[in-house]
Amino acid sequence: MTNVSSDESSAHTELSNSRAIEDHELYRFIPPPIPLIPKNKYTDDIPRSYFLMLYLKRLYGIEKEYYTGEDNNKALNLGAEISFFSLCEGKNSNVVYRRDPNSPPYNSNLLDLRKFLQGTVKTDNREQILPYYTPLPGDKTLVFESRFESGNLSMAIKASNEEYNLVLQNDINSKGNTQWFYFQIKNTSAGLDARFNIVNFTKRDSLYNFGMKILIFSEIENEKSQLGWFRGGHNISYYQNNIRRPGNSKCFYSLSFNYKFEYSDDTIYFAYCFPYTYSDLMQDLTILESNSYIATIMNRKTLCYSIGGNRCDLLTITAQGDPEDIKKRKGVILTARVHPGETVGSWMMKGAIEFLTGRSKEAEILRKAYVFKIIPMLNPDGVIYGNYRCGLAGVDLNRRWKNPNKNLHPTIFASKRLIKSFAKERKIELICDMHGHSRRKNIFAYGCSITDSPELTRVFPYILSKISPIFAYHYCSFKMQKSKESTLRITVFREINCAYIYTLEASFCGPDFGIYIGLHHTSQHLKDMGKQVCLALIVNGDLESPSEEPQPLPEGISTISMFSKKGILDELRNNKELLQDNDNDSSSGSESDPSEDNLDPEEVTNVYPITLTPKPKAEEKKTPVNRSNKKRAESNRSLTSQKERSKIVIKCKLCGEPDLSGHNCQKPKPKLRPIMKPQNIFTYSSQPYYNAAGKKVRDQATQTIVCDWVDVKNVNLRENEKKSIQLSQTPLVKSTEEQKSLYGDSRNSSISPVKKETRTAYRTNSSDESSIIGKFWKNDKAFPNLGRNSRQSSAWKYSDASRK
C-alpha cells in the first residue's frame, strides 16, 4: 500500500473540489431536459372547426323507456306557395337567431377546401362568442343557440310569442341533406306552450309520422331528478309545406311540434337522437386507456387525419399471446359514423367496445380467437360541424369506397387500405358498418348474396336474431343494387374474400315486435345491440362457450350455448322461406335525388381543389426533320398509323426485355476495354503494322497507321496536343500505285478529292489510350459514305482544318 503525504491529499481534495465546481457550472449552459409527455395524453383530441364553437358539457342522466305516440299524417291547409328567401329575409321576418350573421341564410356553409388542404385555415376556437339576441327585461322571446359541437340550427324566425320557424343548416358544401338537428333554448317561461316549425327538410317521409317523439333534455329537471334525455312533445306532424326550394320547383317538408315548458329560466335542448360528439369519443377512449387492464388488450393509434385536421382513431383489441398464436387468429372489423347524423351507430359501437374490453368470459374467448380492428368514427368533421350525411367535401362518404380520393376522402382512403392489408394478413370473419335508419323501425342488417350458397351470407344475421330480442331478421335484405355498388358493403365484398359483410341499421324510433314493442330505443338498448353482435361471433366461429351456468335472462333473450352454426345452417337450408329476399328497400332513407342536394358545377369549382372538367388536349407539335433524324423520320412514315408505332417496343440487347424507363437488366454489360472497329476503307485487319524504322511488326504498341495522302511534314499542333501525340516519321504508302494495290480502285470512287493541306493524321501515344488519335475534316461532302455514328465510334476524329 502506497503512503500518501498530507500535502498531497489536501492538494488532491482541492483539485477534486475545483473540478466538481466546474462540472456544476457546466449545467448552467445545458438546457433542462424536456419532460416526458404522460402516456395517453393527446394534444390533437380537441375538435377543430372553421366556425367558432362554444364549449358544451356532456349531458348525463338517467334514461327511461318512453312509448311512441300515435301515427300522425294530417293534411294541413298551407295556402299559396312562398319562396324560401321571402320567409328568411322578408319585410315581416323577425329573425332572432343566426348561426353565421355575415352570410346569407341559404348555402352559408360553403368552405374553400383548398385552404384546408394547404393548411392556411386557422381553427382556434378560443374567442368569446356573444349571444345573437339578448332579451330586455320582460321580453319573453326565446333565445336560441347552436354554435357548439354537432349543433346545426341556422336560423330562428319569430312568428309570434308562441310560434317560431326554424331553419336547419345544410351539410357543408351541399344544398340539402337536412335531417339531424340539435339546438339549445333559453329564457323559457313556465307554462308557455310554444310551437316550433322546422321548415327545410328534404325527405318525403319520416318516423315522426309513425309515433316517434322529440328528444329533450332539461337542465333543471336533471338537477332535481337526475333525469337525462327523455321523449316529449305533442301535436307532432311531418308534412310537405308551401316553401319552394331555391332553384327548384319542389317544396320543402316541415316538422311541427308543440312543447310546454315546465320551468322558467330553464335551458332546454332539442335533438333528433341521442347526441354523441367527437369530444365524447375522445373522452371515452381516454378513460379506457387509463385502465391498466384494458391497456394490455387494447391499442389506440391515429389511422389518419380528416380534411379539417381531426384525428380518425383506430383501435386494436386482442388478447396477449405468442406471436405465432396471434397470427392464426381471424380478423373482425367494426366501423361507425360514416354518416355523422346517425348517432345510433356510435352508441352501438360504444356497447361493442365496452364489452370487448370487459372481464367477462365471453369477451376473453373472443379476444383469444380474433383480432378486432375498430374505427369508431369515420367522419369526424361531419360530426363536429353538425352534418347529417356528408363530410367537408359535400359528398356521401359511404358512396366513395369504390375509388376514394386521398385528399377529399382521407378517412375512407385509409380505411380501405387498412381493410385490404388486414385481409392479406389473416382471414376476415366479420365486417360490420353501423348506421341509423330514419324511415323504418327495428334493428336489421343489409348483406350481400352468393347465388350458389345464399345461406352463407344469411347465417350471421339469423344467429343475431336468435340471441337478440330487438334484431329483426325478417327486415334484413341481401340485395346488391347497382346504386349501392360504391358502398362499403358491396365494394369490399367484391374485392376481398369475405361473405360476412353487413350494414347494421338501427331505427331512430324503436321496435315494432318483441318485448320492447311500442317503445323508443334507449342508449342502453343500442349498447346491448353492439354487445350482441360480438356474442354472435362465438356461435358463428364455432367457439366453445363458457361452461358456467347462465344467469336468468330477460324474456326473449337466449344464451349462445343453445345454438351452433351447423344447426343454424341446416335450418336455413331446410326452410326456403328464410332464404327468400324480402321486398323491402335497402335505402338508408335518402330518397331524394342526390343531384338535388349537390352543388352546381359553378359552385363546386369554387370550393373543390380539383378540376371537374378535363383539360383539352394540346395539339402535338410537329418537329422539323433535319439531317440527323432523317432516317428515323423515313422509318416512321413507313408505318400506317400511330397505333402501329405504339406497338414497337425497343428491347434490351442483353436480356431481351423491353427497354422501358426503370428497366433493370438481368444481364448487366461487362466492363470490358472498348474495342475500336473502323468501318469501310479504314479497316485495321487489312493493314500491316510498321515501326518507326519501317519494318513490319505485330506489336500494336509501336504501330503506325498513316494514309498516303497525308502530308506529315505540314502539321500544325497546339501545345497541349504535342505532349500526347507523336508524329509518324515514315509514311505507310509512298505512291499511288502501291496504294491501289493495297486498297483497290474502290477507294478513289468513294472518297471525293480533298486538298492535302486540309487533312492531317497522327499516331496515338501508346501510353495514353484516351488521347486524341487524330483530326480529320468533318464534312459530309468529303466522306459521304461515313455516317455520324460510324465516325464517332471509329478510331478517327475528323475536324476542319480551317477551325484552327
Image (cartoon, rainbow, N blue to C red):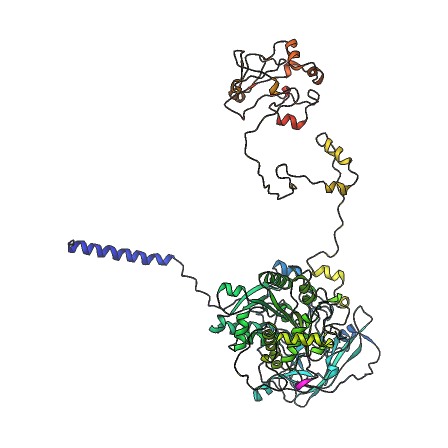
- Up the image or down, 104 lies above or below 712; here it is below
Q: Is residue 492 above or below residue 128?
A: above
Image quadrant of residue 414?
A: bottom right
Residue that extends furthest to the right in the rendered view of this protein: 80
Q: Please determine whether, in this image, residue 121 is positioned above or below residue 155.
A: above
Q: Quadrant of residue 175?
A: bottom right
Identify the residue at the far bottom of this view.
191
762 vs 309, nearest the viewer: 762
Q: Give percent across and percent down for residue 21.
A: 29, 58
Instruction: From the top left corner, tell me how far across and down residue 380 is, in percent.
Output: 62, 68
The picture places residue 796, in percent across and down from the top left corner, at 61, 22
- Which residue is more in the foreground, 189 or 19? 19
User: Could you tell me residue 164's position as x and y percent?
Assistant: 72, 81
Magenta-drawn stretch contains 683? no
Find the magenta span and give its range: 506-517
88 or 770: nearer the viewer: 770
Q: Is the N terminus in the top left, top right, bottom left or bottom right quadrant?
A: bottom left
> Which quarter of the picture shows residue 409?
bottom right
Q: Is residue 737 above or below residue 89?
A: above
Of the 4 image quadrants, the one containing the C terminus is top right
Q: Nearer the viewer, residue 280 or 585?
A: 585
Can the viewer see residue 521 in this picture? yes
Q: Is residue 139 visible?
A: no
